[in-house]
Amino acid sequence: MKINDVSKLTGLPISTLRFYERKNLIPDIFVQRDANNYRIYSEEVVEYLNDVKALLFVEFSIEELSLLVNQQLHLTYEEKKKIVEQKIKEIEDIQKQLRKSKKFLKAILEGKVNFQTKC
Amino acid sequence: MKINDVSKLTGLPISTLRFYERKNLIPDIFVQRDANNYRIYSEEVVEYLNDVKALLFVEFSIEELSLLVNQQLHLTYEEKKKIVEQKIKEIEDIQKQLRKSKKFLKAILEGKVNFQTKC
DNA sequence: ATGAACTATGAACTTAGGTTTATAGCAACA
DNA sequence: TGTTGCTATAAACCTAAGTTCATAGTTCAT
């Protein structure tokens, strides 16, 4: 698969795919180069990138995620486990916040909240 | 209450409080000026800002939220209702994404996911 | 075999959401 | 009454996460 195919299958712009690679977010197992230096992606990269998208959307920064997936940095399993467990806790906090926000927004809909001067 | 009190009670830096005000995120009912041009906040601003914090954390941009709370823009109730309903839907999408991410992270912990070359 | 479409790179640019700095006017307390 | 601390503003600065641009090589369709 070439970069354009991956872009279409994941919905990520080509520029973003190249950017993620520069940020070490795409392990070598997913992408190699052909004779013309074109990127050739494995099929599995699509599922991987969909997970990455979800993780980056709310809970991870590129730097954090890169730390986790980048074997150059030689994090031990224990170190990675710690990061992941911490992240799961953070997600649970976000879930709590979201339930709170939803309540607040619903209260607005029902006219129970008003932060504006009446006039 | 002066700005330093609000900062301490909400955990928002003073610079952020001033910044939010410039972005029309703090309705006039919550803040007035005294004889020295110092900001004097009402007690209610603390709860309001805690809600704002939650909303900005994941689901709203400053601009969107300002649109909603800023009466200068004269949005009708119906227009605001539409924005809020849309936002609730988006939150539900985020909640779905988060459940997916959590699953993925737990699979990593259990060794069921591996995006790295074994060596 | 040539023009449109695809690929590559490095560098510059952009936007959101703040933070920091420079400068100056009040305040509070010994 | 002075000096430490709080407040104000405007403008400059910063970082993350991309995007766009300039330039150049490749490939595909006709």
Image (cartoon, coloured by chain):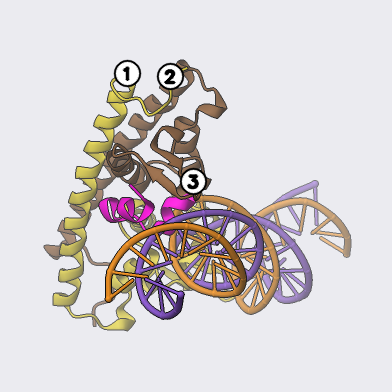
Chain colours: A brown, B yellow, C purple, D orange
Q: Residue at x 48, y 37 (%)?
A: A66
* Label ID, residue A35: 3
Subunit that carries the residue with mark 1:
B
What residue is disc 2 on? B118
Q: Position of residue D7 (x, y in %)?
A: 60, 65
Tag 3 subunit: A
Closer-to-camera residue (D15/A75): A75
Q: Is residue B82 above or below residue B97?
A: below
Give the mark toward the camera: 1 or 2: 2
- The kind of secondary structure element at disc 1 is loop
Mark in front: 3 vs 1: 3
Secondary element under disc 3, as helix, strand or loop, is: loop
* Viewer-nearest residue: D19 or A64: D19
Q: Identify the residue at image location x=52%, y=47%.
A: A22
Q: Looking at the figure, which quarter contains the C terminus of chain A?
A: bottom left
Question: Residue A32 location, x and y as percent?
Answer: 45, 39
Confirm whether the magenta stretch covers residue A78. no
Same chain assignment for discs 3 and 2: no
Mark 3 burial class by Cα count in 10 Å: few <14, some 14-19, many 20+: few
Circles 3 and 1 in contact, beta carbons < 8 Å? no
